Amino acid sequence: MKKRVHNFSAGPATLPVEVLENIKEDFNGFEDIGSTIIEISHRDPIFLNIAQNAEASVRRLLDLGDDQKIIFMQGGATLQFSLIPLNFAPNNSKASYAEIGSWSSKAIKEASKLCDLEICTSSKENNFTNITDLSKWNFSSDSKYIHYCKNETIQGIRISHDPDFDIPTFVDMSSCLFSENLDFKKYDFIYACAQKNFGPSGITLVIVKDELLSRCNSSLPNILRYDAHSEENSLLNTPNTFAWYVAGKMFGWYERNGGVEEMEKRSTEKSSLLYSLIDESDFYQNPVTPDQRSINNVVFTLSDESLEKVFLDEAEKNDLCYLKGHRSVGGMRASIYNAMDLQSVEALRDFMKFFENSYG
């Protein structure tokens, strides 16, 4: 493969070279069938085998219960913002949402059009730098579910604990699924778009308990119903077969590299390298409460804001790319998902030291 930069993009994000090389080989002829994977039917036995293997890998990696169904969908996490209340809080039923970052806020904006939404906790006043303990969240007893985003990619903040609510728990794990070794059986509904941690954009993984599927809004068109997608094994309509195939490659890569437990260990090590440097410096700052910092998205600013463009320009000259923070908050952001190797993070750390010595 030609020269590769250190790719810190928040998504679509870097993929392992091993997986990319394998995809390249398959495009020369998949399993000697005379076609590539993107040229065969989604109902062909060859693709059905790919789909079944991908689902089996997810089940093993996350140690899911028998009552948890796996659905591969389209529309990204953004579509789920609307589908969730449509299915599970119909007729203006009450639903509880945690406002703990930009993606939580986007989910709230969409859901508020469709249900009687209540905010059970908000960290908006502290600029999303500290999240109230889950035990102190306030929600109504008649709420159909509670929803939150586990890892906020823009603010670089996360909830590290498993939930313990007495109502169904719905969690956006788009930027942390497969990076944290959780008790996934405690979550009633999990969703994650692929382009952070398990493939290209265009496919979304949904994990939902059987009991919830039985509650789906039957008045909706089938394409908007989770139970309909589940009954058709995610083949209700033609899926993004390529993204599904790549996701399967990623799941296989995880299994060959120690699974989710090893990914969490690597993520903690990589993020600690950057946080240690930031905390020991007066030149760099990170505003997030230390024990709530994301292990996937490290955000930071410079004490002299006028140097940020210089930092980004010089970083790119050193093949350290896509470090600009989200347009809504500015600063810098290093997204270090599972496919990001330690050497790239070390290269960023060393550059940050050099830059501070040069301009500090």
Image (cartoon, rainbow, N blue to C red):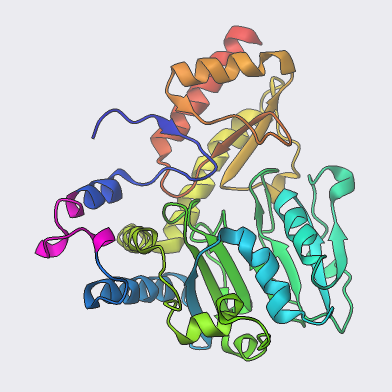
- From what the image shows, is residue 223 above or below residue 316? below
| Residue nearer the viewer, 333 or 107 | 107
249 sits to left or right of 135: left
Give the residue displayed 52% in from the left and 31% down from the top: 322
| Residue nearer the viewer, 81 or 285 | 81
- Which portion, as a residue range, is magenta? 25-39
Percent position of residue 26, x then y: 19, 55
32 magenta-colored: yes
- From what the image shows, is residue 138 above or below residue 159? below
Which quadrant of the view contains residue 304?
Answer: top right
Position of the N terminus, as image quadrant, is top left
| Residue nearer the viewer, 122 or 30 | 30
289 sits to left or right of 324: right
Give the residue displayed 54% in from the left and 36% down from the top: 273
Q: Is residue 127 visible?
A: yes
| Residue nearer the viewer, 55 or 134 | 55
Percent position of residue 30, x then y: 17, 60
Percent position of residue 29, x then y: 14, 56
